[in-house]
Amino acid sequence: MRWPWQRASSAATVSPFVPQPGSGLDAEHGVVSRWVEEAVREVDEQNWYHDVELKSQSSGQVMLDATPDEARRYVHAAAVQAAYWDERANEVRARTNSHAERVNLHQRPDWRQVSVRRRRAATVVSTLMRRALPFEEKDLIALLDWCNGAQRLSMYAVPVGHVTRALQRFRETHELTDALRDRIAQFAADLRAAYDKDAKRYGTAVEQLLAGPADPAGESPAPNDDATVVLAPPTAAPAGNSAVLDAVKRQVGLAGDVVATEALEPDGFPLRVDSPFRSEHALLSDMLASVVGTRQYTQPTLETVRGGDRVLRMDAVASGRLLLAAAERDAAGFVARADTNTPAAWQSRYTVSLLTKMLAQRAFALDRDGVFDLALYIAMRAAPTSRWITGIPAEAMVIPIGSTCCSRTTTRAGSTMLAPARTSIARCTGTAAHLRTTRRFSTERHSDS
């Protein structure tokens, strides 16, 4: 099947950019146009949407080596050309006859020819504006005309952050003329109405320019697209219950002194002699032993494994303790690389992972240390693309982790431990605004050590 615009007779060519007479930027337009065409030829037609770096062509290197004043003029010329290609794109869009054509514009040769050139011109703007250039009013007007002419303003479509900071630097030493003020007002309104959340953030910063120069002592700086915040590396320190998840904490440097252990059957789990979950591990050993050597180890249920009836009668606190015991037993398998040479060992490893998921889906309660320990287990076990973190509904962890992190008594080591768990949960939930939880948690307040 061929779309109407794919017929041989419809192969379109676009009108090349021609600078307006008297622009005073003929030389700059020539360099920008040459780079645009060289960059267009750099990739094949099927990959027209791929980015091309400015330094990849000799004409681009000329612009990179330019003085600040020369670079300012190149940005002005590139913004005018980008706006020109936006106008040509609107013309292509206007020539469509149906919704099917409009949503498949990328299949039109004329659209690709226009879009690739617009993309290359925008690369010149965004790359050169990484420098603090001495823009004049006419340069900013050209940039804003381009931004305000975009069909949908977004961080992807135009370099919003760079333009905002250029306006802020200009406003510190200049009063706004009516022409520039009108364009800034439209830019701010378009940013506030954008679908792009990051673009919306800049709307407030741009609106403030209409009132006057920013007060360095009273205003927060605008978000910086390119800034890298360098934080001091956190110092590892014990967090949670030191006798729980020993194998995991030793791997990440959060464990305390080495404590003697004893191997439990049937999986060989190394139980610390000071473990607070000895009775829970005894129950887990009984449950595992009942399925080892049978087909049930791949599909255990609390109704069929030995000891499962005790689990079904547990209250939330007891369920929370058993969950942590199962979690550290599961963790020992993938962190400590426990012996799996015997059928009993590897069948137990498989079963305990499934039991942990089952226990996590029951009502449970944890104290503050328990929240940290479960969060650490989640961080080590989490699958980034999975909505369910090792079987634990992500919503179930949002409230307890959030409450614990908001506590003034959360230590730096605790915050470090929770960070990867928060990241994993954020990937799964997207937002916590509408989350519900059926879990009950209690948190104990402790003083910092």
Image (cartoon, rainbow, N blue to C red):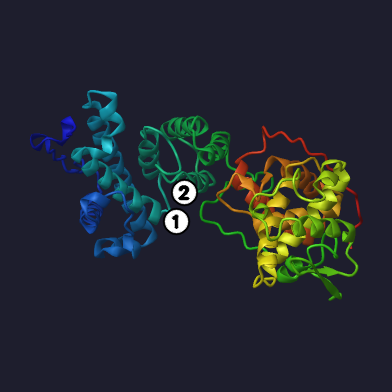
Q: In the image, residue 398 lies at what x, y percent?
A: 72, 43
Q: Quadrant of the C terminus?
A: bottom right
Task: Decide if residue 235 is in sight here.
Answer: no
Q: Residues within 10 Å of mark 2 (few under 14, many from 20)?
A: many
* 79 is higher (above) or lower (below) than 176: below
Asked if residue 210 lies left or right of residue 339, the reply is left
* 289 is higher (above) or lower (below) than 393: below
Q: In the image, residue 62 lies at what x, y percent?
A: 29, 63
Asked if residue 41 lies left or right of residue 133, the reply is left
Q: Which is nearer the eye, 160 or 279? A: 279
Task: Decide if residue 320 is in sight here.
Answer: yes
- Disc 1 residue type (three-letter): Arg
Badge 2 vs badge 1, beta-carbon distance below 8 Å? yes
* Helix, strand or loop for disc 1: loop
Q: Could you say which disc has been placed on residue 223 in the image? A: none
* Helix, strand or loop for disc 2: helix
Q: In the image, residue 10 lies at what x, y percent?
A: 11, 34
Q: Earlier in the sequence, mark 2 or mark 1?
A: 1
Picture quadrant of residue 106: top left
Picture quadrant of residue 394: top right
Which residue is under mark 1? 130
Alpha-carbon span between mark 2 and mark 1: 7 Å
Asked if residue 136 lies left or right of residue 383, the reply is left
Residue reaching furthest to the front: 294
Which residue is under mark 2? 162
Q: Which is nearer the eye, 187 or 71? A: 187
Q: Residues within 10 Å of mark 1 (few under 14, many from 20)?
A: some
- Disc 2 residue type (three-letter): His
Q: In the image, residue 373 lies at what x, y percent?
A: 78, 57
